Amino acid sequence: MQTQLVIPPLVAYYDFKQAPITFDFTNFIVSASALATMQSRMSFDLVLIADDWRKVTPRELAYTDADRQWRLWNLINQIVQVVPNLGDFTITRRPIGEVAVASFPTFYHPHHTPQIPYLYSLPMDAHKAGANVRAFRPSAHALKIIDRMFPDQHNLVTLTMRKAGHDATRDSNLDAWLQFYRELKAKGFRPIIVPDQDDTLDQRTIARLDWEVFESASMSVDLRLALYTRSRMNYLTNNGIIGILLFSQAPFCWYSVIVEGTWVASPQYYENMGISVGSKFPWLDGNQHMFWKPDTLENLRESLVLLPQL
């Protein structure tokens, strides 16, 4: 009797004691997905290790345990939903006692090699190795919802606003965006505002302005990505959700790639990741744009030539 060769599953480990509970998780998960695909695996498994939390940055030190639990269930789990080749998914509240034979990070061990990679350099390396890092896809159900809510999509454009509870220097220039919204409408487009989740659950500053706001998209990564996928163009400034768009097939215009006064939007930050100022990530398509200019009205107007004609 011939023995059948059993290939052990690839298991990705993300330990919150070693890595942040932020959109940086997207760099990790798309790289795990890419590795599984390059190894001709139909799927990969994921283990989130949540027995304790990293407390390094000022933002992390300011989190309460309730904040961390919220982000686990309403950010990390949301991102997991748009990874089509994810197999088994586990959250463990206890330290893990054993590690799979095939692991990501390679040779991962919770005690001897506990480091978890999560920077942009990770998908950059995967892309250089020939992997497809645009791994995120909305679910069929989320697309059905967007098709039902917005049946006429020929003129649909989204504007994603940032007004967060931290690092306010990266917040969107709402006055400029409101005027740009009005000009898009005058040209026959239907712009939809996707507000910041922090603002939606607090002061609702964005929702109070005179424009069409789709607040539900701020609460669901899957629904948000479905909306982005169906839109002719998606505008945004420098915020965490770019981690979803960068690894999707949705079109976008990303403004304020550089923001003075914040490290995660500084020239040095991108150069450390292998991106020179004025360029863009090498896997992006022709309809995915990075603008290294601030989100002033004049700069926003320059992008109108990129919009498909009605």
Image: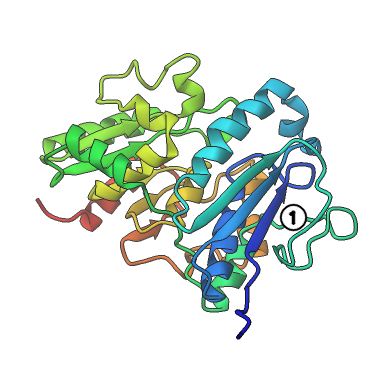
Check the image and tell me how it is coloured.
rainbow
The image quarter in which residue 210 lies: top left
**Residue at left offset 24%, top offset 47%:** 231
Residue denoted by label 1? 116
**Residue at left offset 34%, top offset 15%:** 208
State the SS at label 1: loop
Count the labels in the image.
1
Answer above or below: position of 92 versus 232. above
Can you see residue 173? no
Depth order, front residue of 70/50: 50
| Residue 302 drawn at (x, y percent) | 28, 52
Answer above or below: position of 209 versus 125. above
Can you see residue 199? yes
| Residue 301 drawn at (x, y percent) | 27, 46
**Residue at left offset 21%, top offset 53%:** 307
The quarter of the image holding the N terminus is bottom right
Q: Answer left or right for 17 relative to 168.
A: right
| Residue 97 drawn at (x, y percent) | 84, 50
Q: Answer left or right for 65 relative to 204.
A: right
